[in-house]
Amino acid sequence: MKLREFSLEDLNLARMWLSDDYIQKFWGNPQDRISEITQNLYVDWRKYFIIECERPIGFFQFYETDRAANGNWSSEPIGTVVIDYLIGDRAYLEKGYGSQIVCLLVDFIKSCNEYDYIVATQMIENVTRTKVFENNGFRLNSNGIFCLDLTNSGIKIHRATMQDVSEITELFRETIQHVNSQDYPPDEIEDWSEWWTDHAKWLLKIEEQFFIKAMIDDKIVGFSSLAKDGYLDFLFTHKDYQGKGVATNLIRKIERKAKEQSNDMIYSDVSITARGFFEKHGYVVKIQQLKKSRNKELVNFRMAKRI
């Protein structure tokens, strides 16, 4: 079994499948689905035929939840994809192909090495579909959506909101005072961490930048932000979650966003403490510099990475 990219030439076969009564029961009006497929064929939705013995037997599509319209997926983490599939050839129904197909789809999405979670809608009346997803490791969330965690890290990345400012600024202050203090003298640490009080500045950053937060359960354990010109403004991990993959998860999302913004390069002013982390991720020191915080000048490094 394999996947083949879907093209306009495949619409007639898709239309025939979608017109079948047993598919309409779950997929709805066939013309609505064909319009949806056609309108999104060359944008963010990725569509494939499922091929068995060189014969198309079904259809598969997936897209990222943070690029979808608000609705069922608006609360899902960045890095989540929605999948859906159908078996269009009746000869392949009720023969165990559903589990094989979902396993194939999961392996395919894993191979992209871009996504953290896969979700799918629950269809209560479709008992077979429920068993297929459960057999492939999906779990039903409290919101009625099947979810598969590809990372097993428990870290979820979301866009930061204005309501997060207090928690983010407290994290900022505590990280500087407990982590960066190993590389900077007390007077510089105090000066730098005082930025936590300037909530107006933070609110502006959240509004203007791609500002994301890392969550474990209901706690913010890190945050990062990217300006439109490719400047990585912040990357901080909570003092109690150092070395647990939080910063790596954040920087992956930042670099992906930079590519979406067509930035040729990400650049940042990196502390002594964070230099090793950035070098590990392919960033190069361009210059050592003194940069003014509030009243003190602190040593840091202008670092950059071509993407």
Image (cartoon, helix red, strand yellow):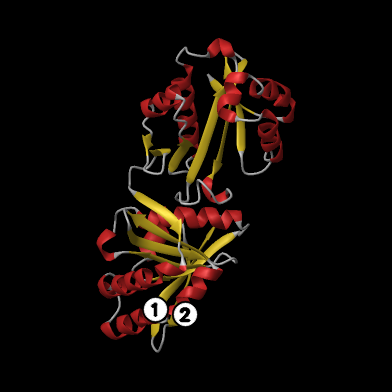
Residue at point 53% right, 53% down? 256
Residue at point 66% right, 33% down? 33
Query: Label 2 belongs to which residue?
Result: 200
The tag on residue 299 is: 1
Q: Is residue 50 visible?
A: no
Q: Position of residue 39 (x, y in %)?
A: 71, 40
**Local crowd at mark 2 within 10 Å, few (<14), some, or many (≥20)?**
few
Say if 93 sits above or below 123 in the image. above
The tag on residue 69 is: none
* The C terminus - image quarter: bottom right
State the SS at label 2. helix
> What amino acid is at disc 1?
Val
Which of 247 and 21 lies nearest the eye of the viewer?
21
Q: Position of residue 26 (x, y in %)?
A: 55, 27
Tell me how far mark 2 sits from mark 1, CA to CA. Answer: 26 Å
In the figure, is residue 244 to the left or right of 297? left
Residue at point 30% right, 53% down? 244
> What amino acid is at disc 2?
Ala
> Hey, which quadrant is residue 50 in on the image?
top right
Say if 284 sits above or below 7 in the image. below
